[in-house]
Image (tube, rainbow, N blue to C red):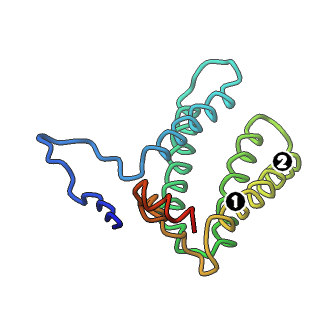
Amino acid sequence: MAAHAALPSRRRPKTHGRHLRTRGWGLPVTLGLAYGIYAAAIQRSGGVITWGQVLLGLVSGVVLAGAVYALRQRGRALPRELRATAWAVLVGGAIGFLYSISDASVLSATVLGLVIAAGTFLTAFYLFYTHEDATGTEPAPTTGAARPHTTGTEGAAARRR
């Protein structure tokens, strides 16, 4: 006789007190913080910190964090081509902007941003294409119960046939 697989519990354990729930803000805030600090450090060029550099770092970090959050939350509604394009525009624009504030020419910052965007598009499209089915949805996760459980005697009988 085959045994049934135990269904996972859908209840969450009760906890007392309040807990901080990030609801998907952990990665965007971390990236935004790192990006803002790096943008301010590039603009500083080893000199004295000014309020303009702090404001540049703050605004660029908040914009990047908001864009990453929006793409992570609403990106699945887009077809894989547009989602890959959105990530490519975000990453290419972010890298191009960082390079442009390092006193590089606009042309070289644009070329670097486009090259990074092209690589990001190819990588993201490949990732989305290989992890979705033809309708654009991710397949259901497997539970590990793909084959029925057998006892030792049933398995031996099946091998003899």
In x, y percent, where is residue 120? 74, 55
Which mark, by number, is residue 88? none
Q: Left or right? Give the position of 58 relative to 90.
A: left
- Work out which residue is located at the far bottom of the displayed protein and give it: 135
Q: Nearer the viewer, residue 129 or 10?
A: 10
Disc 1 designates what residue? 124
Residue 48 quadrant: top right
Q: Which amino acid, mark 1?
A: Ala
Eyeballing the image, is 99 above or below 25?
Answer: above
In x, y percent, where is residue 103? 80, 35
Counting residues from the N terminus, which is met first, the one under dot 2 or under dot 1?
2
Please state, as top left, top right, bottom left or bottom right, where the C terminus lies in the image: bottom right
Indicate the secondary structure of the residue bearing disc 1: helix
Residue 124 quadrant: bottom right
Q: Residue at x 49, y 54 (%)?
A: 66
In x, y percent, where is residue 97? 71, 46
Residue 9 quadrant: bottom left
Disc 2 designates what residue? 112
Q: Nearer the viewer, residue 116 or 151?
A: 151
Q: Nearer the viewer, residue 7 or 96?
A: 7
Eyeballing the image, is 116 above or below 87?
Answer: above
